[in-house]
Image (tube, rainbow, N blue to C red):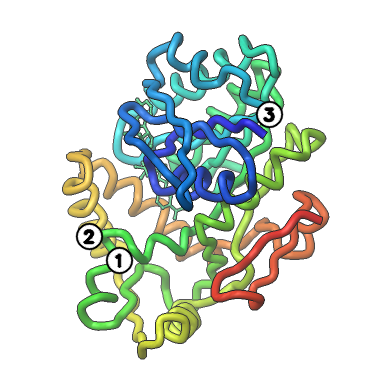
Amino acid sequence: MRVTVFGASGVQGAAQVAALSRAGHHPVAVSRNPKALTIDGNNIETCAADFTDTDALQRAVKDAEAIFLNLPSTSFQPAEPTIAAAKAVGEAAKQSDKKPIIVFNTSMPVPVESKGIEAQDDRRTMRTLLRSMDLPVISIQPVCFLDNMLEGWAWPPIRDRQTIVYCHKPTLDVSWIALDDVAQLMIAAMTRPELAGRDFPVGGPEIVRLPGLAERLGKAWGVELGYEHQTVEDFCVKIEEAMRERSGIDGGVLAEQMFRAYSWYNVSGTVVDGVIGRSRISANVGCRMHPRSHSRSIWTLC
Ligand SMILES: NC(=O)c1ccc[n+]([C@@H]2O[C@H](COP(=O)([O-])OP(=O)(O)OC[C@H]3O[C@@H](n4cnc5c(N)ncnc54)[C@H](OP(=O)(O)O)[C@@H]3O)[C@@H](O)[C@H]2O)c1
């Protein structure tokens, strides 16, 4: 299938482009200034489009049978441009002859009822907006990305002293999910148009606590990995520094939002409420996970 991937230069979109290409689909990788891209030696079609550029968006979705919609954060910048971006992509999809299915990666949990966390509420607004345009939208709602371990706010203590430092309390059950697996779920979803209108909270193959995460990652990496429970306050300082370095984003606003989100995770006792486990994914999205068949999990359509 020809699949237009928005946010393709970000970590989430990049994983989806690679997964689509490896699965024999034709991804079109969209960002504002795309660079030449190859996956396993295959050239990937790229398209330059800013969310504010209607013509460019129409070019980006031309002939697409599916759209993978990844949107930038509203945690640390005003929400309006990103909500407008969702609308603009929706309008471009509406104009397209192929009537592509939109697989919307909310990038975070979106509880059914608002928890007063604006970033989550913004995602709900975007989803509602797209559906109000009478577009076929499947919403994939992942929890924490395992790949966060490689980000600037988490990687240094792993690299320097073999310790995972994270603000999850040690008794918090977390269904970490790898971005590769989010991508596989989105691929599985795009071939099931009957799922339009559905929202899928998704997590990884196992629910682990911080000690379990350290044990599993340590085993996979062949190192003794410790863990430390960091306060939410300290986590927010680190993420603020990392994001400022990455993109000059207003870290103060980010830190406040993150503080609320991570405090909510910790007090809610679990981040897996409502998350689809393996058996239900199999039933609902049409894929099956084989967590132990390789060093990382594999999804297959069933
Ligand atoms: N669940 C988790 O564990 C977790 C972890 C990290 C992030 N997140 C969430 O994921 C979301 C996205 O994260 P992020 O911002 O860090 O993503 P990111 O990886 O930096 O990617 C953002 C993407 O959006 C594109 N983009 C930005 N502005 C654009 C515009 N005006 N027009 C077209 N494309 C544009 C960027 O492309 P160019 O800049 O190259 O044009 C890039 O490809 C956030 O809501 C964040 O909170 C969740």
Specify the amino acid type for callout 3: Ile
Residue type highlighted by circle 1: Ala
Front one among 252 and 180: 180
Residue type at numbered disc 2: Lys
Q: Gap in Å between the C-alphas at discs 1 and 2?
A: 8 Å
The quadrant of the image that shows the N terminus is: top right
Read off the residue under disc 2: 238
In this rendering, the answer to whether 54 lies above or below 189 is above
Residue 112 in sight from this viewpoint: no
- Considering every residue shown, the one lying at the far bottom of the view is 224
Q: Earlier in the sequence, mark 3 or mark 1?
A: 3
Marks 1/2 in contact by CB < 8 Å: the verdict is yes
Q: Is residue 91 left or right of residue 280?
A: left
In three-dimensional space, the C-alpha distance between marks 3 and 1, rounded to whole angstroms, equals 35 Å
Q: Is residue 183 left or right of residue 82?
A: right
| Residue 101: numbered disc | 3
Residue shown at the point (82%, 55%) measured from the top left: 283
Label 1 neighbourhood size at 10 Å, few (<14), some (14-19), many (20+)?
Answer: many
Q: Quadrant of residue 93?
A: top right
The mark closer to the camera, 2 or 3, is 3
In the rendered image, residue 55, in percent from the top left (x then y), is placed at 45, 9
Does the image show residue 244? yes
Instruction: For ligand 1, tell me if the residue under mark 2 lies within 8 Å.
Output: no
Q: Earlier in the sequence, mark 2 or mark 3?
A: 3
In which quadrant of this rendering is ligand 1 seen? Answer: top left
Q: Which mark is residue 154?
A: 1
Q: CA distance from mark 2 to mark 3?
A: 38 Å
297 sits to left or right of 72: right
